[in-house]
Image (tube, rainbow, N blue to C red):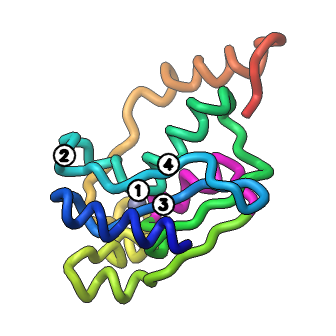
Amino acid sequence: MRKAIELSRENVANGGGPFGAVIAKDGEIVVTGVNRVTASCDPTAHAEVTAIRAAASKLGTFNLSGYEIYTSCEPCPMCLGAIYWARLDKMYYGNNKTDAKNIGFDDSFIYDELELKPENRKLPSEVLLHDEAIKAFEEWMEKEDKIEY
Ligand SMILES: [Zn+2]
């Protein structure tokens, strides 16, 4: 966790957001990540996602079970989802989402949106071409040599 915090502070000095993350196994750091949203013009380049991408690439797997993530701040819904998808064993965080909200990084509206039915969310959305879209799912179900994840 101290490394994640150190990364978050260094990133502020380097012009990035105040967030850092570390993925480790048995207490040994495997990879690190920092927030690169503005530097990379990538709205998904949060520290946790950056660390997960680095770990998956370094380890050659999309399944990070057996590893743990240390993040300087409680993750946003995107990163929390990424942590679940990566199958990380455990998460540790330093700052919480209220601390983040207090400095202008408010992701509580996304958590609030998730509680609503799609038609009640701020993001307009509608179903299109379901009959055509479902074909990929049917093909997936019939495929015998698929790599499940
Ligand atoms: Zn995030």
Rendered location of residue 98, percent (x, y) = 37, 88
Real-space Cα separation, disc 2 to disc 4, in angstroms? 16 Å
Real-space Cα separation, disc 1 to disc 4, in angstroms? 6 Å
Q: Which residue is mark 2?
A: 39
Left or right: residue 3 versus residue 109 is right
Mark 1 residue CB less than 8 A from any atom of ligand 1: yes
Rendered location of residue 21, percent (x, y) = 48, 60
Q: Earlier in the sequence, mark 3 or mark 1?
A: 3
- What is the secondary structure assignment of the residue under circle 3? strand
| Looking at the image, residue 91 lies above or below residue 131 | below
Q: Which residue is mark 3?
A: 21
The answer to whether the residue labelled 3 contacts the one labelled 1, judged by CB atoms less than 8 Å apart, is yes
Task: Considering the whole magenta stretch, tell me its main secondary structure.
Answer: helix
| Looking at the image, residue 121 lies above or below residue 44 | below
Q: Quadrant of ligand 1?
A: bottom left
Magenta part of the chain = 77-89
Q: Which residue is mark 4?
A: 51
Q: Is residue 148 magenta?
A: no
The answer to whether the residue labelled 2 contacts the one labelled 4, judged by CB atoms less than 8 Å apart, is no
Real-space Cα separation, disc 3 to disc 4, in angstroms? 6 Å
Residue at the image point whose x is 43% and y is 67% from the top: 76
Q: Residue 101 versus residue 50: which sits nearer the camera?
A: 50
- What is the secondary structure assignment of the residue under circle 2? helix
- What is the secondary structure assignment of the residue under circle 1? helix
Type of amino acid at the residue the image marks with label 3: Ala
| Looking at the image, residue 75 lies above or below residue 39 | below
Rendered location of residue 53, percent (x, y) = 50, 39
Real-space Cα separation, disc 3 to disc 2, in angstroms? 17 Å
The answer to whether the residue labelled 3 contacts the one labelled 4, judged by CB atoms less than 8 Å apart, is yes
